[in-house]
């Protein structure tokens, strides 16, 4: 029986969520006037249960890179449901094998794809693999980095988040160094006891600070010097968001492991992958059950992910992304000229964009003002002066212009209010 007519109202959903799911989150979002309950969603638009229309410029960190419910992806899943289920993770599967072949072919230097259901799980697997390959256990990561909330991923991310759960590791096990400081990575690795350096290619949660020219190459050299694995977390920056399929390709470096998640799912079926080179994946040759994940690479998600890769690498998509990158570069430069006292910095790496404002909570204030202007984009969690602004790969030119216009309106409103005290 279809009981959607009896679905709870927006107020009932908020009450139930506050009671049973995530009380503090509901209260915080309500305080920010961002207590949305999303109903219909199509393309880059979504509607809350009150019918308010929003243009999605957050995309859940890139989960909806290709838009919400892309018709070709919905069709892949529909067809898959006629013949597949999760699959049995003990046996080889055509769906997983074909997806692995495609991912490895598209990712320089990689040999193996190990599937998970989320990004944190994929990060954990990369760090476990580095520990196993090196026989070491120390991990170096960037202060303000974010790699998920599972075990090793949590410890590699913000120290406070891990400490709250008693998961920060033994003293010295997880070392945090400033991003864009290769000398700090060298100092941390110099004793030759570090298993892995893990970095987001462009760290999201501090507002997409781009790597300085040469930084990643220097980190790569440090890793080579000390027998340390270089793991790049491309959960937010991969899948065509910066131009090439992976952001690291812009820097001419060769990691030992690459993490992809979020957008690989097409926003429809959870799936992630840890891509490993010969060295880090060596254990797969002699320990078949060294890592298992019941839902990792669930067969229903594989055809969707393959289609995601096809659509993402389609020359027409790549060309469209190039034109969007230019459109946003021009539009944001214009906004800088129009609001020089408020919009202090535009950090643009392709369609991965961070905006820094002249107030410690500037990004947070902009989140609220943009909502009023019909755009959903969220501030950077570890630096609320910044806003994460993430246009989708297939965003229409008119939608891109509308997003820039909303940003202009929000800058005028918030910047003016802040300047006026
Ligand atoms: C860069 C990065 N890595 C890893 C993760 C963790 O992914 P998941 O939430 O699927 O575990 C995220 C999620 O936001 C992320 O942004």
Image (spheres, grey):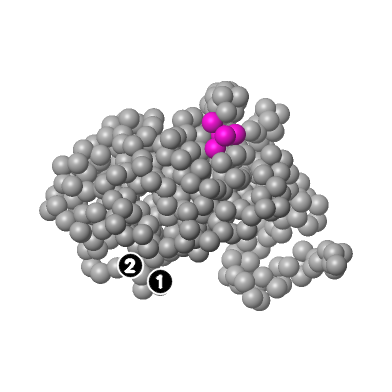
Q: Is residue 188 magenta?
A: no
The percent position of residue 155, horizontal first and vertical second, equals 35, 62
Range of the magenta residues?
309-313
Q: Position of residue 230 (x, y in %)?
A: 29, 45
Neighbor class of circle 2 (other Cα within 10 Å; few <14, some 14-19, many 20+) is many
- Identify whether 222 is placed above or below 360: above
Which SS does the magenta portion mostly show?
helix
Q: Is residue 249 left or right of residue 42?
A: left
Q: From the viewer's perspective, is 57 left or right of 282? A: right
Disc 2 to disc 1, C-alpha distance: 9 Å
The residue sitting at the bottom extreme is: 19
Badge 2 vs badge 1, beta-carbon distance below 8 Å: no
In the displayed structure image, the side of residue 86 where residue 197 appears, left or right:
left
- The image quarter in which residue 209 lies: top left
- Circle 1 residues within 10 Å: few <14, some 14–19, many ≥20: few
User: In the image, residue 186 lies at what x, y percent?
Assistant: 18, 45
Instruction: State the image quarter where residue 161 is shown.
Output: bottom left
SS label for mark 2 = loop
Q: Which is in the foreground here, disc 2 or disc 1?
A: 2
Name the residue located 42 percent from the left edge and 39 percent from the top edge: 104
The residue tagged 1 is 164
**Disc 1 secondary structure class:** loop
* Residue appearing at x 19%, y 52% in the figure: 188
Camera-side residue of 35 and 64? 64
- Residue with the mark numbered 2: 168
Indicate whether residue 312 is drawn in magenta: yes
Q: Position of residue 383 (x, y in %)?
A: 45, 51
């Amino acid at each position: 029986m279809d009981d959607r007519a009896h679905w709870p109202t927006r107020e009932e959903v908020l009450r139930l969520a506050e009671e049973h799911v995530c009380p503090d989150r509901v209260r915080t979002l309500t305080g920010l006037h961002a207590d949305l309950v999303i109903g219909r969603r199509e393309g880059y638009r979504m509607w809350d249960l009150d019918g308010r229309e929003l243009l999605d410029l957050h995309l859940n960190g890139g989960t909806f890179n290709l838009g919400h419910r892309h018709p070709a992806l919905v069709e892949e899943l529909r067809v898959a449901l006629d013949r597949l289920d999760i699959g049995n993770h003990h046996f080889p599967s055509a769906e997983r094998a074909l997806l692995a072949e495609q991912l490895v072919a598209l990712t320089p230097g990689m040999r193996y794809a190990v599937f998970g259901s989320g990004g944190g799980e994929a990060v954990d697997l990369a760090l476990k693999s580095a520990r196993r390959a090196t026989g070491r256990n120390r991990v170096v990561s960037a202060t303000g980095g974010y790699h998920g909330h599972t075990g090793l991923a949590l410890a590699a991310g913000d120290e406070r988040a891990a400490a709250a759960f008693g998961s920060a590791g033994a003293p010295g096990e997880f070392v945090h160094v400033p991003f864009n400081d290769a000398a700090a990575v060298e100092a941390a690795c110099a004793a030759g006891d570090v298993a892995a350096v893990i970095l987001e290619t462009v760290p999201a949660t501090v507002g997409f600070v781009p790597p300085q020219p040469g930084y990643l190459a220097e980190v790569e050299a440090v890793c080579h010097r000390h027998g340390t694995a270089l793991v790049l977390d491309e959960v937010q920056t991969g899948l065509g968001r910066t131009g090439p399929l992976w952001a690291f390709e812009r820097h001419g470096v060769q990691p030992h492991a690459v993490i992809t998640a979020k957008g690989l799912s097409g926003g429809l079926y959870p799936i992630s992958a840890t891509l490993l080179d010969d060295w880090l994946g060596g254990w797969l040759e002699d320990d078949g059950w060294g890592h298992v994940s019941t839902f990792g690479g669930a067969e229903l998600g594989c055809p969707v992910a393959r289609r995601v890769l096809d659509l993402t690498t389609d020359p027409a998509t790549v060309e469209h992304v190039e034109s969007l990158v230019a459109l946003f570069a021009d539009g944001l430069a214009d906004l800088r000229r129009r609001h020089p006292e408020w919009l202090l910095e535009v950090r643009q790496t392709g369609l991965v964009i961070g905006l820094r404002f002249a107030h410690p909570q500037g990004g947070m204030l902009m989140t609220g003002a943009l909502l009023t202007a019909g755009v959903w984009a969220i501030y950077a969690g570890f630096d609320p002066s910044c806003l994460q602004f993430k246009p989708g790969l297939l965003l229409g030119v008119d939608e891109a212009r509308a997003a820039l216009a909303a940003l202009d309106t929000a800058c005028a409103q918030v910047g003016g209010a802040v300047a006026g005290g």
